[in-house]
């Protein structure tokens, strides 16, 4: 059995540091790299892409609203055509940096409020899909199982990757508990590791109210900004290895054919 582990990285900005990207990239198989709209500056993203390339970790474009002040966690009522342009811009910027190290962007995943919005917001989901189609229809789209984003992406002929969260609480309907509410974050290493193993083996997760939610996922996310994220990631990997589960990316690393 195989599962991809992904983490949000490249989210530092200038002298402000967030997370331990190097430690996370030693563990995960895919990296959701910020593209400068919610976090990350060119020098930070360059260092992050270099580290990922050195470790053969697949780089994904973590696209977001243009919201540095709010870390991309505030909903924005962006017009679809503007959102499409913003997403294309972000993918292209990150890919330009990737090419310095002989790799390409391997997938697209929304961040924060945009991720949550495209679970139900049809117009914004369509705008993100349109951006991927315009940039490179070979790129997989990562999102929440049952989301409008994955449905529209599949209808457009894109590969979809359903994702679970190791360190986030779930509601009974399979959506994430908002970060402003109790139970939104799970930080105990044993609990996180067991949750991931249950997602992979039993294909379910237990919601806050005790409901058993069916969860068929190809990738599991560990947030790089969660306290002790690298330790949580190592605990997850140890638990998976003990159960005979191999960690590997859902898509092969893509080299830059132009050198």
Image (cartoon, helix red, strand yellow):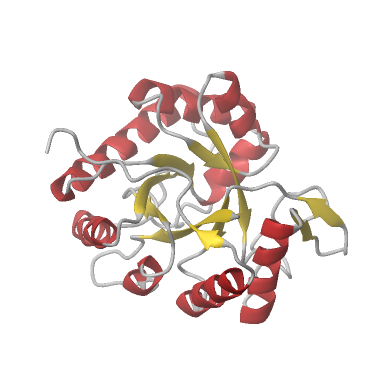
List x then y, in percent, for residue 67: 42, 49
Is 124 displayed left or right of 13 in the figure? right
Q: Is residue 193 above or below residue 35?
A: below
Specify whether residue 225 is in view.
yes
How many callouts does the rendering have?
0
**Which quarter shows the C terminus?**
top left
Q: Is residue 20 above or below residue 164?
A: below
**Which quarter shows the N terminus?**
bottom right
Q: Is residue 20 above or below residue 32?
A: below
Q: Which residue is at a point 62% across and 77% down the rendered structure image?
A: 187
Q: Quadrant of residue 160?
A: top right
Q: Which residue is at a point 30% across and 34% down the rendered structure image?
A: 89
List x then y, in percent, for residue 225: 47, 69
List x then y, in percent, for residue 195: 70, 67
Depth check: give the residue in front, 14 or 242.
Answer: 242
Q: Which residue is at a point 32% across and 65% down the rendered structure image?
A: 12
List x then y, in percent, for residue 192: 65, 72
The outermost residue toward the left is 259
Q: Which residue is at a point 41% across and 32% down the rendered structure image?
A: 139
Q: Quadrant of residue 16?
A: bottom left
Q: Quadrant of residue 197?
A: bottom right
Q: Is residue 72 above or below residue 228?
A: above
Specify whether residue 123 is in view.
no
């Amino acid at each position: 059995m195989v599962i991809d582990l992904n983490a949000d990285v490249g989210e530092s900005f200038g002298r402000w540091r967030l997370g331990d990207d190097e430690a996370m990239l030693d563990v995960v198989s895919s990296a959701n790299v910020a593209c400068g709209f919610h976090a990350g500056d060119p020098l930070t993203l360059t260092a992050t892409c270099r580290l990922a390339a050195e470790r053969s970790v697949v780089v994904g474009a973590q696209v977001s609203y243009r919201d540095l002040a709010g870390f991309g966690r505030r909903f924005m009522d962006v017009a679809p055509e503007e959102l499409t342009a913003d997403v294309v811009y972000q993918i292209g910027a990150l890919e330009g940096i990737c090419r310095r190290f002989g790799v390409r962007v391997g997938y697209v995943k929304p961040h924060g409020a945009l991720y949550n919005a495209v679970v139900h917001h049809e117009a914004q989901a369509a705008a993100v899909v349109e951006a991927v189609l315009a940039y490179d229809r070979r790129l997989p789209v990562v999102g929440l199982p049952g989301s409008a984003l994955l449905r529209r992406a599949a209808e457009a002929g894109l590969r979809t990757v359903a994702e679970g969260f190791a360190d986030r609480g779930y509601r009974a309907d399979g959506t994430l508990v908002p970060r402003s509410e109790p139970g939104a974050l799970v930080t105990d290493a044993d609990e996180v590791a067991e949750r991931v193993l249950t997602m992979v083996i039993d294909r379910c997760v237990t919601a806050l109210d005790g409901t058993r939610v069916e969860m068929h996922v190809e990738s599991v996310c560990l947030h790089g900004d969660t306290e002790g994220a690298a330790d949580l990631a190592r605990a997850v990997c140890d638990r998976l290895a003990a159960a005979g589960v191999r960690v590997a990316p859902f898509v092969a690393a893509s080299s830059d054919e132009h050198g």
